[in-house]
Image: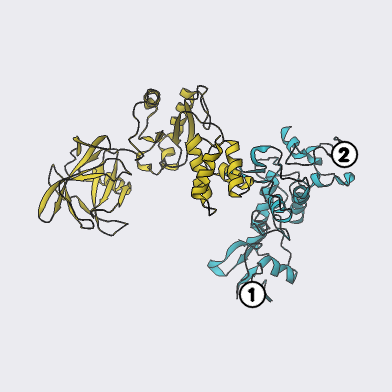
Amino acid sequence: MITLTINGLEVSVEEGTTILEAAQFLGFPIPTLCHMEGLTPYGACRLCVVEIGEGPNAKLVSSCTYLAEQGLKVRTASKRVMRARMMIIELLLASCPQSKIIQDLASKYDVRQQRFRQEYEDCILCGRCVRMCEEQMMAKAIGFRGRGQNRSIGTPFDIPSDICRQCGGCIYVCPACTLRCTYTEPEKAICGGCANISPPCIQKDHFDDLMCYMDPCVACEIKKE
Amino acid sequence: MDEQVIEKIVAEHHGSLGGILTILSEVQAKYGYLPEDSLRRVAATTNVSLTDLYGVATFYKAFSLKPRGKHLVSVCLGTACHVRGAARIAEELCKQLGVQPGETTADKEFTLETVNCLGGCALGPIVVVDGRYYTNVRKSKVAEILRKTRAGLDKPQGNHGFPLTIQCPHCQQNLMDPAKPIDGVPSIHLTLCWNGGRHSLHLSCFYGSFVSACDEEIPVDSVVGIVCPKCGRDLTSEWTCLECGAGMARLLVQEGAALMVCTRSGCKGRRLDLDTILAEETNRPNQE
Ligand code: FES
Ligand code: FES
């Protein structure tokens, strides 16, 4: 067992527990985006930042990938953490404003402005779908391609994959565009109001465009406009 | 595409995940790029998923999924080259070839690409054409480089990197010896002191080639003295070799850098140094 202190409270956890899990155990809320139970931690979105250590040695780490250490002092909502978190949300808003999840995060953390150049990305590269496809669906039909600015997710050569079983798992876990996975309850597909487009899916040929990685999805269409 | 070729390459390197890079680069060496079928074939024979292979192939700039031209022109846009005006060189190349970086000319002669640092920052801006390094490139030199390449001149001799023109740091005299070519170009002439005797030593002027010739058999691992054949002054410096710890001889490169050569026979310690020259350049006006 490992004992650490989170926001002044002591807690003992099994070896191999992440800070995120320990904090959740104590009931401290830490927002997450790329993290998902059942998928390996990936640490892509940095939303789950917490501050560890003390004094000049204190630093920010992503709690979903950082394993608990003996005697570690963790702060999940210090000034520094909140500042970093708000900045991350602001950046997410700048790249993917049509996501309901990101909008909700912004309102929860009181992010009221977005000072960067507005983009309409359909993907924040959190890698949830990639891990879902590989780890839960055992398919590995999609993956990361390119790097830096040109990094994207999709199938090799951008052609429909023959490994893909069209399970829709990737769409289901995507936080960037909740539109994609509300097709069973079309009346809930309200997001994208800001971009002022009509609800997707329901007005399209039945389920034709649902496999976002196979065909243009609605977010891509927002971008086109 | 030849399936056997791919299978042979795979058989040679497979075993570890690290082998993938070698396999892909060999496939690319074979076809000039990575054809789609070849990637599928590699995936099938290695059991690495096509998705991963594609990820690797698109991650590294060294790999291309599109057919490339006969000549590959790489312009360095790294930091050092950038501040020396590499962007203008790239622009000029785009203009003269009529393509954007990453594209191939319609006649399939040239592929233009940009890279981020080739490790020769002291000599920037650098343009590499088919492995031949052009250093200190000016906008006005671009047309000449392309003309030479088209004509098939200026082929590099083997895979040696770029040739240097060496001077003595003391007397500033040129030490290149056309009478004794190594790797097809004039070699660096030095005097080697060993066991009380003086011998003449010739080194290849390609940074990256270790071919040398000496009129005396020097046993491996013995540390020798190096002096300038013109002024006779000692060239050994306070620098020590990172490989073996022996002293290094310091030579001046005309383009403006120092070349350090390890003084232990058999050791391949070499180093191209920019700092010392910069320091000297800033000191020089005071001395004059
Ligand atoms: S949830 Fe931890 S980095 Fe995304
Ligand atoms: S920046 Fe061009 S060689 Fe390093």
Q: Amino acid at mark 1?
A: Leu
Q: Secondary structure at mark 2?
A: loop
Q: Going by the image, does A180 lie left or right of B111?
A: right
The chain ID associated with circle 1 is: A
| Residue A63 spot, x, y in % from top left | 65, 63
Q: From this viewpoint, is residue A10 visible?
A: no
Instruction: Determine whether the beta carbon of the residue marked 1 sits less than 8 angstroms from the nearest atom of ligand 1.
Output: no
| Tag of residue A202 | 2
Residue B81 figure quarter: top left
- Compare marks 2 and 1 and give the one earlier in the sequence: 1
Up-down relation of residue A224 to residue A136 (above or below): above
Q: Colour of chain A?
A: cyan
State the residue lying farthest toward the left. Answer: B196
| Residue B61 spot, x, y in % from top left | 52, 41
Image quarter where the C terminus of chain A lies is: top right
Residue B175 figure quarter: top left
Total labels drawn: 2
Seen at 45% across and 32% down, the residue is B72
Where does label 1 land, which residue? A4
Q: Are marks 2 and 1 on the same chain?
A: yes
Up-down relation of residue A152 to residue B88 (above or below): below
Q: Are marks 2 and 1 in contact (CB under 8 Å)?
A: no
Front residue of this view, candidates B62 and B102: B62
Instruction: Determine whether the beta carbon of the residue marked 2 sits less than 8 angstroms from the nearest atom of ligand 1.
Output: no
Q: Colour of chain B?
A: yellow
Seen at 75% across and 39% down, the residue is A219
